[in-house]
Amino acid sequence: MENNFDTKIEGIKSKLNYKYLTEIRKKLKEDESDYHLEELNKMIEDYSASKKAKQEEKNESESSEHAFSNLDQYMFKRPWNRLPEIHKLIKIKEYVNKSLIIYEKNNKEVLIKQMFKAIKEKKLTRKGSVNYDPVKGRIISIPSLKYDKNKETYFLVKS
């Protein structure tokens, strides 16, 4: 966290120095003085060059992050039975955490483990076992998942 503040402070210092130098150059030109004007112009050019380099580096890192997120999205935009096992596990966990209302963390973890086991045993890997939207890349429903009102828990029906 402190490193983030340090970089922000350095950025502010750099901007202030740049503005200060450009104001001095502007004042010297108004006064028609060439006192250290060449050195001043060189310093301003150095600041501009370093600023451009930092901006290019930032743009490059953002574009690579964007490419990886697009790749992730592409990986999930396949039919359920064509998804790799690891992606199925990710989507199951996402479905349980976002779509099901389970207040107790322990019950949520038990259900996730049951569903992971069903995927490993190829019970939730068939086409009709999970209603999956490949366009949005998310699980709509799981027909074999039922809710027990008395115990207030979800469970998988054996097929």
Image: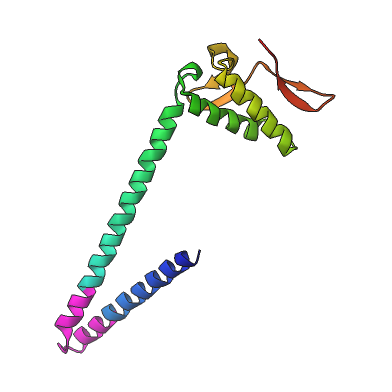
126 to 3, vertically: above or below: above
| Main secondary structure type of the part rendered in magenta | helix
Q: Position of residue 22 (x, y in %)?
A: 27, 78
Name the residue rendered at 35%, 72% in the picture: 15
Name the residue rendered at 66%, 10% in the picture: 159
Q: Is residue 59 visible?
A: yes
> Relative to residue 70, is residue 29 drawn left or right?
left
Name the residue rendered at 38%, 69% in the picture: 11
Residue 16 quadrant: bottom left
Q: Is residue 136 visible?
A: no
- Relative depth, front residue between 153 and 134: 153
Q: Position of residue 126 (x, y in %)?
A: 54, 13
- Relative depth, front residue between 150 and 117: 117
In the image as oriented, which residue stretches furthest toward the right? 150
* Magenta stretch, residue numbers: 23-44
Residue 51 quadrant: bottom left
* 38 magenta-colored: yes
